[in-house]
Image (spheres, grey):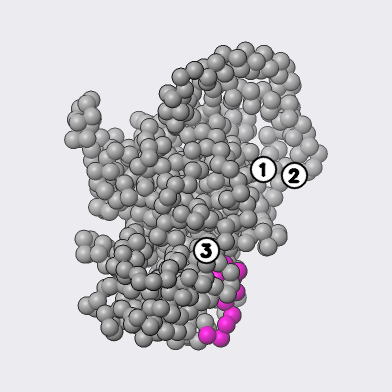
């Protein structure tokens, strides 16, 4: 299948489309600004409450007649442009495939080595988020604004979070789970240079052993790293940018004073992390971008949280080790924390957490509501610093391809570190109400993640979708789930080049990501909860219809509280969501039909841990029979705090080949 790298088959149509949109855009922009001036966000309301001179009201009185006059003047040109634009959509392709040609541009990503299906297996990490990148006037109805600036900041935060080193800590002693602060102080910031990234303190080998696999430049060719990899047997093949720390039980995990002094000197010498080239020089344009103390939203910030893995600067003199431990381990994603969680949920087989960062070594990203085309370009530019392959501007326009007129595309965007082999898009024809104005649908992708020594391709399937949003449209969503299953089955058949007798391809995974706009606890969503999709695909957060696992939380934030100081930064939002009482104040909850109207009655009727409408599903069917797929980690992510009204989710799958490490 040919991947479309431009929206039109020839340059003449592209130029004609650009000309027609140039006639439409002034009218579109003026209408957007006019409506936006009358839809303030809660942040703007608070700012204006402190304005005794009513300056903003005066500005609206002056600018509204100007906007109206210019809007009326631009209407004739917009009409001519629309008459040219609409018929051109019949020749428009359903998506644009962008591949990063200049590898130097991807300065935050490690270079992937091709998986050869050797060793015990390989893990793949998937992320999904609804980023609410609508035209500014429409985004304000969700209490977010400044779409263009938000798009750039969202992309920057995602790539910064994903490009940090992945640190795994294994505790060998069954009786001791303490982790020495010295173990962490020997680990340097991911933004450091190559020499600092490879800093390993030989003095701590008595109590800890550390293997650092990969760095931001992707170079990992030292003899020591190869020897450690072969000897340890713990890491899986192809895990880039990973630091393994193994802690033994000797001396209770603590160090001598001499060893501690050595570590302190090295950590102090490593110095602060280098800021990103374009990040900190930029002045934030919206409150969503403010970095406060402890904000971990951008790893470029010097105020990044403890979980930035791990930026420690130990000064001269005595150090209170317990204080350092508390600061470093407060919310770090480590095995000690995992062991505590597993005491609560002993039947769980994988790690789960609320994280202030996107997972390190994120392989695939599925985004929804990237409706604004200018914002999509800004987002793509930022994501290309980490992801080499991006599919964006997905959908159809006008009356072509779907039953009703479509003003905006599907809002879907897919980013990958692995090459895309095939892609297909289908539009849901049964959208209702305002949802029918967007070409909501499903994007299906086939990616190549490696090859076997016998030259068989190793592939994976990923589907990204966004269902009907209007409450009460249960039948519509069920029909869309039916279509999703049928289209996915057709896509797999049409793109498969294998037969049972002669398998040219080995399927490693099949994952569905997206905003399904129903949760697993609301009584109004019973039909969707019992859909056959959940018999074919597994939901790691779900026990059964109507019941989520105790650790699963909602992904839909209450828009009214987005700018509260308690939740406006990733660290603060993480702390709030880890508390049951905190969640009640800032998540949208499924409620029973007979809930009370008062705040007290509303809280009494809350069910579950919030409305979880963003899903990550996987299946074990249709994969290579000799391989096993299981969830290794599931995360609810707060890194986009203040930038969207949804919580991103991430899932790491382990594909086990059943072979021993060489």
Is residue 622 in sight in this rendering?
no
Residue 64 on the magenta segment = no
In the picture of the structure, the residue carrying the numbered disc 3 is: 272
Which is more foreground, mark 3 or mark 1?
3
Q: Earlier in the sequence, mark 3 or mark 2?
A: 2
Residue 390 on image: x %, y %: 61, 53
Q: CA distance from mark 3 to mark 1?
A: 47 Å
Query: What span is in magenta?
Result: 213-224
Mark 2 residue element: loop
In the picture of the structure, the residue carrying the numbered disc 1 is: 93
Name the mark on residue 140.
Answer: none
195 relative to 567, above or below: below
Residue 317 on image: x %, y %: 39, 71
Q: Are marks 1 and 2 in contact (CB under 8 Å)?
A: yes
- Residue situated furthest front in the rendering: 317
The residue shown at (42%, 50%) is: 293
Q: Are marks 3 and 1 in contact (CB under 8 Å)?
A: no
In the picture of the structure, the residue carrying the numbered disc 2 is: 9
Mark 1 residue element: loop
Q: CA distance from mark 1 to mark 2?
A: 8 Å
Q: Residues within 10 Å of mark 3 (few under 14, many from 20)?
A: some
Mark 3 residue element: loop
Q: CA distance from mark 3 to mark 2?
A: 50 Å
Q: Earlier in the sequence, mark 1 or mark 2?
A: 2
């Amino acid at each position: 299948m040919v991947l479309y790298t431009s929206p039109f088959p020839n340059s003449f149509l592209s130029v004609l489309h650009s000309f027609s949109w140039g006639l439409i855009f002034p009218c579109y922009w003026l209408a957007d600004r006019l409506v936006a001036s009358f839809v303030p966000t809660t942040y703007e309301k608070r700012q204006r409450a402190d304005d005794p001179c009513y300056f903003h009201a005066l500005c609206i009185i002056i600018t509204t007649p100007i906007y109206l006059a210019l809007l009326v003047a631009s209407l004739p040109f917009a009409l001519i442009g629309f008459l040219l634009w609409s018929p051109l959509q019949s020749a428009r392709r359903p998506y644009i495939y962008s591949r990063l040609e200049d590898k130097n541009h991807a300065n935050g990503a490690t270079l992937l080595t091709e998986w050869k299906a050797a060793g015990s297996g390989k893990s793949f990490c998937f992320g999904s988020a609804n980023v609410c990148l609508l035209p500014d006037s429409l985004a304000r109805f969700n209490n977010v604004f400044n779409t263009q600036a938000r798009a750039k900041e969202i992309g920057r935060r995602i790539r910064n979070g994903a490009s940090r080193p992945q640190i795994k800590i294994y505790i060998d002693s069954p009786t001791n789970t303490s982790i020495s602060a010295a173990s962490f102080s020997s680990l340097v910031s991911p933004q450091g240079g190559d020499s600092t990234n490879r800093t390993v303190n030989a003095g701590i080998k008595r109590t800890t052993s550390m293997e650092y696999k990969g760095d931001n430049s992707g170079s990992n060719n030292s003899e020591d790293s190869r020897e450690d990899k072969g000897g340890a047997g713990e890491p899986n093949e192809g895990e880039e940018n990973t630091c393994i720390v193994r802690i033994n039980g000797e001396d209770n995990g603590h160090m001598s004073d001499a060893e501690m002094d050595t570590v302190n000197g090295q950590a102090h010498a490593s110095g602060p992390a280098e800021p990103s080239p374009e990040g900190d020089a930029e002045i934030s344009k919206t409150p969503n971008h403010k970095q406060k103390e402890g904000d971990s939203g951008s790893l470029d910030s010097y105020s990044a949280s403890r979980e930035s893995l791990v930026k420690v600067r130990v000064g001269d003199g005595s150090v209170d080790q317990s204080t350092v431990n508390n600061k470093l381990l407060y919310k770090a994603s480590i095995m000690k924390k995992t062991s505590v969680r597993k005491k609560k949920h002993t039947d769980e087989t994988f790690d789960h957490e609320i994280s202030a960062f996107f997972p390190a070594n994120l392989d695939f990203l599925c985004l929804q509501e990237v409706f604004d085309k200018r914002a999509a370009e800004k987002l793509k530019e930022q994501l290309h610093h980490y992801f080499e392959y991006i599919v964006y501007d997905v959908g159809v326009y006008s009356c072509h391809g779907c039953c009703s007129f479509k003003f905006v595309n599907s809002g879907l965007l897919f980013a990958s570190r692995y090459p895309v082999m095939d892609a297909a898009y289908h539009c849901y024809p049964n959208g209702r109400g305002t949802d029918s104005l967007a070409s909501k649908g499903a994007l299906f992708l086939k990616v190549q993640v490696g090859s076997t020594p016998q030259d068989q391709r190793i592939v994976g399937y990923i589907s990204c979708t966004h269902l009907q949003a209007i409450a009460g449209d249960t039948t519509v969503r069920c029909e869309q789930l039916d279509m999703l299953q049928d289209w996915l089955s057709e896509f797999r058949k049409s793109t498969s080049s294998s037969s049972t007798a002669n398998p040219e391809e080995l399927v490693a995974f099949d994952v569905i990501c997206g905003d399904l706009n129903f949760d697993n606890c609301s009584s109004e969503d019973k039909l969707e909860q019992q859909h056959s999709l959940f018999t074919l695909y597994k939901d790691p957060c779900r026990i059964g219809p109507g019941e989520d696992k105790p650790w699963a939380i909602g992904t839909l934030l209450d828009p009214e509280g987005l700018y509260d100081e308690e939740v406006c930064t990733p660290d603060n939002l993480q702390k709030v969501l880890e508390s049951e009482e905190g969640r009640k104040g800032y998540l949208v909850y499924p409620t029973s039909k007979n809930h009370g109207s008062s705040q007290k009655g509303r809280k009494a009727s809350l069910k579950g841990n919030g409305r979880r409408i963003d899903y990550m599903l996987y299946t074990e069917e249709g994969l290579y029979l000799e391989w096993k797929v299981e969830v290794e980690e599931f995360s609810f992510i707060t890194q986009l705090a203040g930038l969207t009204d949804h919580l991103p989710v991430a899932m790491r799958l382990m594909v086990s080949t059943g072979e021993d490490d060489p």
